[in-house]
Amino acid sequence: MNTALLALGSALVFMLLAVWVVPVMGYNTQERFAPNQPVPFSHRHHVSGLGLDCRYCHTKVEKSSSAGMPSTAVCMTCHSQIWTNAKMLAPDRQSLAKDVPIRWTRVYTLPDYVFFDHSIHIAKGVGCTECHGPIGDMALTWKARPLHMSWCLSCHRDPAPHLRPKDQVFNPHWQRTPSTPSGKTLMAAFHIHTTGLTDCGVCHR
C-alpha cells in the first residue's frame, strides 16, 4: 500500500514538473542558445569594439515594427575595403555578386498571433538591451530573454524601471546613475500611461 502511494505521489510530482517546469527550461525556451548563421557576425566586435550604432545596420528600427536586417551592401560598405578575402565573409561576397539576400537564422521568434512593434518601444525609451540582453558584448548573437507573456506583462504593468533617456536607447552599456531621471519622470516625458497597456488587443491582433 505504501509503495503504491509513493509511486502515485511520484507520478503526480513528475506530471507537475512536466507541465509547469519543462516548458520554461532554457532548453525549450532556447535561452542562451546561439543558432548557426551563414556569417558569424560579432556584435562585440562591431558595436563595442568599433562603436557602430545599432541603426547603422538595423535601419528601420525607429520607424517600423521590425528592426530589419542589413542588406549585403551595408556589410560591404566596409568589407569591400577590409577583410576583402576573408573566408568567413564568402557568403557576403556571393550575396553581393548574385544580388541574393543572405538568409539569416532568426534568434527571436514570436507566434503569428503576437504583434510586437520595435518602433513604439524605442520611442518610449526602452533600450535594446531590455529585450536583447548584453547584445553589445555578444561574440555570437544568442537569445537573452524567454519572451513569455508573463515577462512582457511585467514590463507593461510597471514600465518605469525599464526606461532610459532617449539619447541612451541605443547605448548597449548604459547604466542608471544618481543623475538619471527617475522612472516616473521618464514615463511623464514619454507620455506613458499604464491604463490599457495590459489589454489583450495591445499584443494580440
Image (tube, rainbow, N blue to C red):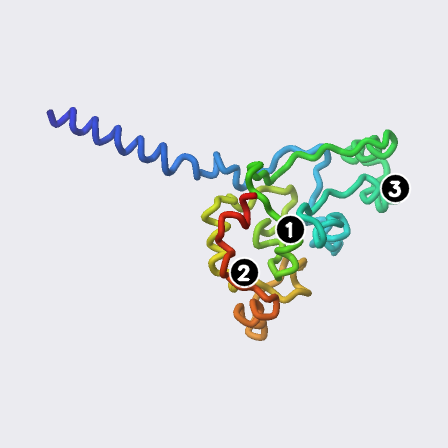
Rounded to the nearest whole Å, what is the CA distance between mark 1 and mark 3? Answer: 30 Å
- The amino acid on which the numbered mark 2 sits, given as a three-letter code, is His
Q: Secondary structure at mark 1?
A: helix
Quadrant holding the C terminus = top right
Please give left or right for residue 135 compared with residue 6 in the image.
right
Residue nearer the viewer, 108 or 60? 60
Q: Secondary structure at mark 3?
A: loop
Image position, residue 178 (x, y; %): 55, 74
Instruction: Tell me: residue 188, above or below residue 157.
Output: below
Rounded to the nearest whole Å, what is the CA distance between mark 3 and mark 2? Answer: 39 Å
Disc 2 to disc 1: CB gap under 8 Å = no
Question: Which residue in the protein does label 2 denote?
Answer: 162
Quadrant holding the N terminus = top left
Question: Which residue in the protein does label 3 denote?
Answer: 80
Image position, residue 196 (x, y; %): 50, 57
Q: Secondary structure at mark 2?
A: helix
Please give left or right for residue 106 compared with residue 56 in the image.
left
Q: Which residue is found at the position 64% from the left and 41% from the top? A: 140
Instruction: Tell me: residue 67, above or below residue 98.
Output: below
Image position, residue 131 (x, y; %): 57, 50
